[in-house]
Image (cartoon, rainbow, N blue to C red):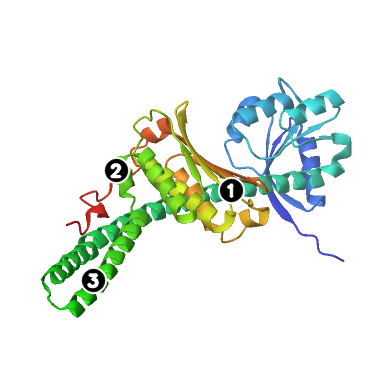
């Protein structure tokens, strides 16, 4: 004989008949439930009792001066979450439908109490699953928020580190290369040996190449051009992209652009930089269009190309951190990124509501970090 598992449940029973209460307990015990119950028969006692923890509430439909539907409404007003089952000697279909619509878990006739234990267990299990889903959703939301905060911290840390490296290149490498350049130029002017001058001129060309490489690295690490404004930075970036790749890159900007909140220019610049890098590596495009606009308090930056487009496999790659990084970077200034792609090309749109960013004092103005004389364009000028 199979052993029946007994399941203890705390049950509040709204019932004016002691006999019906005992019948209910007997049916529950037959169904494998060990009821820890309290019977109440009026509104005041019910309101006091619902303050205690229960696994379920079972209510008669008709009571003297009270009813199961009124109890259901009171229970919902108290923020009740446990199953509420109505039991009646006679209940119409319309009343049963109204009860279920108002939050009852089930309804039963007293003439068919054999359904009570299965219905109660089903309702209790469903409620436990719902609570578990709610907890899981809350934990998932909290995890997403922590991940978002970590991504923001990493983005900020990356920009701070880039600025620190750019400063070291400027102060140490740039200064040293400039000194070597002047020394070599001095040797070329003063040396009477043609062989020495030839070697010095060769070394000077190497130093000049190193200075140009340092300038390029510094621009990539920390866009000093942003100090002249986002429009100027995009103009410089579009021109540089066109010269480097040979792909025409058209830029449209508004006649007037408002003063942008802290952090926004750098996010827009990095978004355009990432988009152009991807286009040059993967798109096989013959033209690129950059549009900067401001309307309705929203700054939008659109970068589109006529390349081969991105497949769903490309977008869904486990290690497509570039696209994910764009989304996270945009969120640091309350913005978002929309990406669409087809065989006719790819379009990326960054949207930033400027009013929302202005209200957030925590957004760092990373574009201006370490702005003391980091312009490398003057290195080595005679």
Q: Which residue lies at the image location 37% right of the left edge and 37% below the top edge?
A: 360
The label shown at residue 172 is none
- Comparing 52 with 315, the one in front is 315
Residue 227's mark? 2
Rendered position, 97 above or below 28: above
Question: Looking at the image, which residue is at 38% across and 28% down?
Answer: 256
As drawn, 206 above or below 133: below
Residue to which mark 3 is pinned: 201
Q: Is residue 74 above or below residue 177?
A: above
Q: Residue at the spot x=85%, y=40% of the render?
A: 113
Q: Position of residue 138 (x, y in %)?
A: 55, 46
> Within the image, what quadrant is residue 2 found in?
bottom right
Q: Determine crowd level at label 1: few under 14, some 14-19, many 20+ residues with C-alpha closer than 10 A.
A: few
> x%, y% of residue 201?
23, 71
* Circle 1 residue: 135
Q: Quadrant of residue 178?
A: bottom left
């Amino acid at each position: 004989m199979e052993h029946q598992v007994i399941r203890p449940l705390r049950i509040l029973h709204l019932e004016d008949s002691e006999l019906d209460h005992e019948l209910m307990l007997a049916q529950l015990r037959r169904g494998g439930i060990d009821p820890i119950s309290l019977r109440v028969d009026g509104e005041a006692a019910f309101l006091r009792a619902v303050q205690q923890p229960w696994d379920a509430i079972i209510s008669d439909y008709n009571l003297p001066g009270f009813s199961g539907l009124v109890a259901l409404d009171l229970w919902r007003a108290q923020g009740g979450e446990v199953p509420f089952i109505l039991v009646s000697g006679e209940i119409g279909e319309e009343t049963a439908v109204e009860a279920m619509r108002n939050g009852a878990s089930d309804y039963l006739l007293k003439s068919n109490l054999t359904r009570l234990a299965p219905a109660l267990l089903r309702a209790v299990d469903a409620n436990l699953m719902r609570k578990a889903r709610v907890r899981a959703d809350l934990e998932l939301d909290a995890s997403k928020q922590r991940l978002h905060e970590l991504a923001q911290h990493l983005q900020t840390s990356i920009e701070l580190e880039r600025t620190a490296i750019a400063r070291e290149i400027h102060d140490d490498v740039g200064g040293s290369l400039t000194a070597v350049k002047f020394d070599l130029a001095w040797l070329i002017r003063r040396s009477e040996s043609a062989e020495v001058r030839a070697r010095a001129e060769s070394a000077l060309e190497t130093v000049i190449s190193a200075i140009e490489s340092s300038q390029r690295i510094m621009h990539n690490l920390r866009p000093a051009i942003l100090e002249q404004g986002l429009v100027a930075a995009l103009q410089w970036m579009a021109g540089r992209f066109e010269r480097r790749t040979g792909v025409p890159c058209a830029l449209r900007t508004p006649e007037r652009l408002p003063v942008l909140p802290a952090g926004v220019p750098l996010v827009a610049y990095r978004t355009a930089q990432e988009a152009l890098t991807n286009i040059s590596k993967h798109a096989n495009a013959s033209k690129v269009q950059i549009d900067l606009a401001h309307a309705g308090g929203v700054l939008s930056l659109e970068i589109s190309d006529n390349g081969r487009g991105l497949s769903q496999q490309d977008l869904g790659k486990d290690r497509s951190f570039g696209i994910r990084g764009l989304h996270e970077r945009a969120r640091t200034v309350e913005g978002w990124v929309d990406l669409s792609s087809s065989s006719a090309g790819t379009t990326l749109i960054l949207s930033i509501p400027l009013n929302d960013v202005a209200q957030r004092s925590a957004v760092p103005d990373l574009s201006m970090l370490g702005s003391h004389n980091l312009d490398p364009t003057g290195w080595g000028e005679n």
